[in-house]
Image: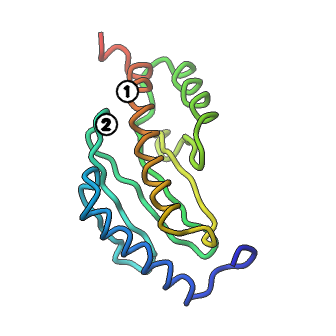
Amino acid sequence: MADRPATGVELDALHALIDAWLEHQLAENPTVAAVDRDESDLRRWFVRLRGEEKDTFTVWFTLRQRTLHYETYVMPAPEENHERFYEHLLRRNQKLFGAAFTIGDEDAVFLVGQLPVAAVDEGQLDRILGSMYAYVERCFRPALRIGFASRFG
């Protein structure tokens, strides 16, 4: 499966694994507020987390033929101090494992990553969810204070 697209049967098995893992997270993990599944043909889940620095945020998991893609919206484009803001995020990227800050639609900031489907297991899913939570929590407030400094005056 590492060098080729996953078959329908393999994707179905991973889909079931992710569903079961998310059910467990919703029942046992106090930071998981809700789990929803995309009702379209996409294999996509939305995991809403309770944060401390950022009250709530959602991590989207999308199972594709070759990768499990994951992302979360972090914040809108900065209003000021653009250079310092993006420098801050780029420097933070150096310390992240399996994810990176990116610029998305309307110049909003996202945190994104992907994992080969061959590597998807409960341990990796735990690592991804925990890392996304930690990275947003660590980076949100400092980035907010740089990009929206006049609101904190």
Residue at the spot x=30%, y=67% of the render? 36
| Amino acid on which disc 2 is placed | Lys
Position of 20 with respect to 7 (left or right) is left
Position of residue 94 measured from the top left corner of the image (x, y, whole percent): 64, 34
Q: Nearer the viewer, residue 91 or 146?
A: 91
Residue 92: percent from left, percent from top:
57, 31
Residue drawn 55% across the image and 90% down it? 9
Report x, y in % for residue 91.
61, 27
Looking at the picture, does residue 150 appear above or below residue 126? above
Asked whether 105 or 118 is in front, the reply is 118
State which quarter of the image contains the C terminus: top left
Q: Which residue is mark 2?
A: 54
Camera-nearest residue between 106 and 91: 91
How many marks the image carries: the answer is: 2
Task: Describe the element under mark 2 as helix, strand or loop.
Answer: loop
The residue shown at (38%, 16%) is: 149
The kind of secondary structure element at disc 1 is helix
Q: Name the N-terminal-most of marks 1 and 2.
A: 2
Q: Amino acid at mark 1?
A: Arg
Mark 2 and mark 1 in contact (Cβ < 8 Å)? Answer: yes
